[in-house]
Amino acid sequence: MEPLYEFAWIIPVLPLAGAMILGLGLISFNKATNAIRQGSAIFIVSLLGAAMVLSFGLLWSQIQGHPPYTQMIEWASAGDFRLTMGYTVDHLTAMMLAIVTTVAFFVMIYTDGYMAHDPGYVRFYAYLSLFSSSMLGLVVSPNLLQVYVFWELVGMCSYLLIGFWYDRKAAADACQKAFVTNRVGDFGLLLGMLALFWATGTFEFELMGDRLSDLVSSGALSAGLAALFAVLVFLGPVAKSAQVPLHVWLPDAMEGPTPISALIHAATMVAAGVFLIARMYPVFEHVPTAMNVIAWTGAATAFVGATTAITQNDIKKGLAYSTMSQLGYMVMAMGVGAYGAGLFHLMTHAYFKAMLFLGSGSVIHGMEAVVGHDPVLAQDMRLMGGLRKYMPITAITFLIGTLAICGIPPFAGFWSKDEVLGATYAANPAMWAIGWLTAGITAFYMFRMYFTTFEGSFRGTNTEIQKQLKLAEFQKMGLSLGPGAMNPQELTLETAAHGDEPESHGDHHHSHEPHESPITMTLPLIALAIPSILIGLVGTPFANYFEAFIHPPSEVIEGIPSEFELGEFVTMAGSSIGIALLGITLASLMYLSRKIDPAAIAEKIQPLYQLSLNKWYFDDIYEVLFIQGSRRIARQVLEVDLRIVDGIVNLAGFVTLVTGEGLKYLETGRAQFYALIVFGAVLGLVLLSGLTG
């Protein structure tokens, strides 16, 4: 197996090579490259498929007990200063490589059907391949410096993909918002990274953790500074994994095509933050303050995301807030020391959430056959209903994903979420209560989404609802905060009305009924449904194979953990299943049998309803504090520039001009005139001295 490790660097290089070849083709031979659409797709998917095979080979080798493998080269040196680059393959790397390549592979197959009629088809594949390469490079990075390089590449690719339809204002605003928000977190990560290097003299994860612990225990570095450095590093994952308060970019990222929504929100960009926490675990575990900050940030994110998802009507944005909430569970688990539980939930979530997003894309694809390529109508669940009859494969797979995320046994999400909640209860019962309540809310909003979309009667041809939705959207545009405001709700409805919306991946004619998606879209849904059902079985409390494999670097686990209290398991699992069933029951009473009127409840709890509907007012607060505030500062700086800086410069120029104009009459070149000036000056001095004397 050793040659497999020696050539592991090929895994991120394969998709990078594909992106480069397609990119060079688009730049140099644009028409010819765009003409071979299917060939380009097959080429990119084949390269990623090869990377996936290598990744599973490495995973199997690690499961069999192969020791971690690291290959390093000296990148830069000056005296005693050394910077090294390379790649590492250990248990965490092998697991993440398998997850990323699997999800990316199925997303790329799905893309062929979803983007079939899009003019940017080949460019989208080039971006997808570059994005996959960046994430794979991040996963194999052996030190924090190299992680940072690929971290920024992932951010750049997300900017390109979220703003793929850059001629739509909403997409252009969304990618800017994602870029700016992530720069805030990345600046904190950079500061923390440099501070830790200053303190420890290394970027190597385990060595950094050991040295930081020694410095704090010896008193050479205060615990407060160590906590500050660790929290600064954590700011990177806060932005990348959409944790409160830097989560605001995530729902707006839905302006990108649905395949990239699945890739960003399942296995790549948002998972990068949780992955970095896991990689930096040797540092964080020695800093209790940082661990508390991480845990409470995760708990708050889980709750805020879930309570916001309750009132979302856009199917993709509802899933986006769901992703934010599930990421909160993972971060909370890391913060309470449940390293394995956090990564277990990351793995299960990657598969069922990718399937849910691809399922939403299939729904949108079917809806566009009825309402046209208008995201306001095609993505709004109020226009759906009864789609199970028209799209049975999409409906069944979406239901499987819904059951998995709700934590219903034996689906994958049950085992991972139960492990997170169990570990949280042991560490902090108050935090567990937040997670437990969030589990019930999750079940409610996910089944609200399922019932509204797939059950009941089809509402897509109801012109009255369409008019109401369009009117509401125009009213939102009328309340816009002016040019340049990053308002994700401002959709360019005029272009949609003329039928030239960039998202033209479906049929170009309207019908009275939606239809099932093509095989290239339904096949990935079926494939992802299998791990969504079964993969949780590797981490059951009866025989936790996952925990034995993925244990923290500081621990050594011999054998498969199987000791557990049956009574405790039944109590914890029963409570989480119970709250989930309560949420499902409430959703069915409101949105399936219609025995409870949601509008009446919303009217009674109007402040809470508005809090959820307005996304906890985060965007409004940021609008006032940062967007309008930065504009006020910019205007004041402009005034200073115009009145003071420009004034001084203009005054200097004016004085020079005036004195020059005056002196040119004195500089005649005649000696008699100069003598007259000297005589006049002397005479003036004599008279002045006489007067003063």
Image (cartoon, rainbow, N blue to C red):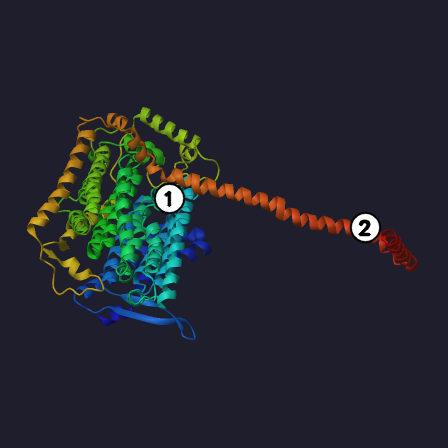
Q: Position of residue 87 (x, y in %)?
A: 31, 66
Q: Amino acid type of disc 2?
A: Gly
Q: Amino acid type of disc 1?
A: Asp
The secondary element bearing badge 1 is classed as loop
Q: How many labels does the image show?
A: 2
The secondary element bearing badge 2 is classed as helix
Residue 288 occupies quadrant: bottom left
Q: How dense is the environment of label 2, judged by Cα within 10 Å: few (below 14), some, or many (20 and up)? A: few
Quarter of the image that includes the C terminus: bottom right
Report whether 519 appears left or right of 657. Answer: left
Q: Circle 2 sits on which residue?
A: 662
Q: Which residue is drawn at 31% across and 54% down?
A: 273
For this rendering, which residue is in front, 114 or 385? 385
Q: Can residue 168 be seen at all in this image of the molecule? A: no
- Badge number at residue 118: 1
Q: Position of residue 536 (x, y in %)?
A: 16, 51
